[in-house]
Amino acid sequence: MEREECMTTYELREMSGVQRLKETFNQTEKQLAGHGKRNVSILKEAFEGVSAGMMSDQYGTGAVIEDFQQKMAAFLGKEAAEFFPSGTMAQQAALRIWSDEKGVPRVAYHPLSHLEIHESDALKELHRIDSVLLTDPDKVITLEDIRRLEAPVSCILLELPQREIGGQLPPYEELEAISAYCREHGIRLHMDGARLLEVLPVYGKSASEVSALFDSVYLSVYKGIGGIAGAVLAGDAGFIDQAKVWKHRHGGNLISLYPYIMAADHHFEKRKDRFGDYYTEAKALAARFSGLPLVTTLPDVPVSNMFHVHISLPKEQAARALAEVQEQTGIGIAASLKDAGADRSYFEMALGDAYAELTEAELDDLFSRLGRALEAVRA
């Protein structure tokens, strides 16, 4: 049996709140967020009905990869697209291409961009590209932030939605203004659209309409879509020709990628029209959290399927309350917490298929228990 299945109530009680939070989450059968626990069913479901004689891709060629890339290029309204093993690799390739084009090894993005806080300075160490941080960490980038740039940049990266500040978004009119400004001033505009599908219901636009404002677009195939891993990078044909070269240089042109691609294709078709439901459910869930003592959400009303839940308790105390409720109900709320300063902590919610599997009675019971647990640890 797996370790988490063997944990006794006594063993859980002996853990710290943070440890217990993770263990109780691992034991839950249902979750509030995501598409359920990630396991091999992602691949198994995608391969059901596939002929054993279907040919694999080989070093980036073959129908299985080429057809998927063409489909995603059309979906994003771009001339071409390339599948990458990771979004980190795809975005570094994009920014390197735009930096080389202009001869300016400098790009601008949000202070909490994935490239800045999660990639060990890869852009600088591998590509010798410097970054300019736009706006304050808790704000969304605006046109005025870009106008105030003092040094020339080759490219500006915008993340839609801005994950680290609760999935916030600029108004669509602001995006249009930023796009027009960049084109007028010869600055390339790249979209970190890892969660692009999540923002389409908010903007009331198609993926191609939003992508048309950008020179290049990155889309994750495992986050909201729910595939195994990987990313799509899209742009004009010349850009993608260069992206293929950089994928090879990064070691990403593997002999075959079909398990990733087939899983991505299957789950894309399964979920591409569900993001409006996820958005509606996120607003309902955020309202439930906001009705609890000591709890607020960021934003107050979600602008995508994502938001942050802030608790006015230190991480250890909040973790104890959450862990207790997870253990009692068998419903996963969070596996970890982050410090928010001043005796506050928070966790992220991103809605997917899992939320719809919960009944109103289960949700009522969960939030009733959570409210009592939070009050108890505060007392």
Image (cartoon, rainbow, N blue to C red):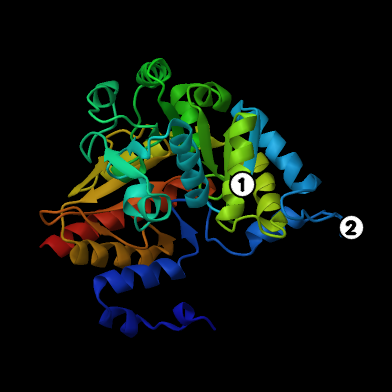
- State the image quarter where residue 125 is shown: bottom left
Seen as rendered, the residue at the extreme right is 53
Q: Where residue 199 sits: x, y (%)?
A: 46, 32
Quarter occupied by the C terminus:
bottom left
Question: Is residue 227 at least partly visible in the picture?
Answer: no
Image location of residue 257, percent across then percent down? 69, 56
The residue most toward the front is: 103
Which is more toward the observer, 365 or 144?
144
In the visual, does 272 lie left or right of 218? right
The picture places residue 87, in percent across and down from the top left corner, at 51, 49
Residue depicted at x 52% and y 32%: 216
Distance CA(mark 2)–CA(mark 1): 30 Å
Residue highlighted by disc 1? 245
Which label belongs to residue 53?
A: 2
Amino acid, disc 1: Val
Determine the residue positioned at 84% across, 55% down.
55
Task: Kindly identify the amino acid type of the residue bearing the numbered disc 2.
Answer: Gly
Does residue 227 appear to the left or right of 285 in the view shown? right
In the rendering, at what x and y percent does residue 50 appear? Answer: 82, 54
Q: Secondary structure at mark 1?
A: helix
**Image quarter of the N terminus:** bottom right
| Residue nearest the observer in this picture, 148 or 333 | 148
Q: Tell me: residue 145, above or below residue 46.
A: above
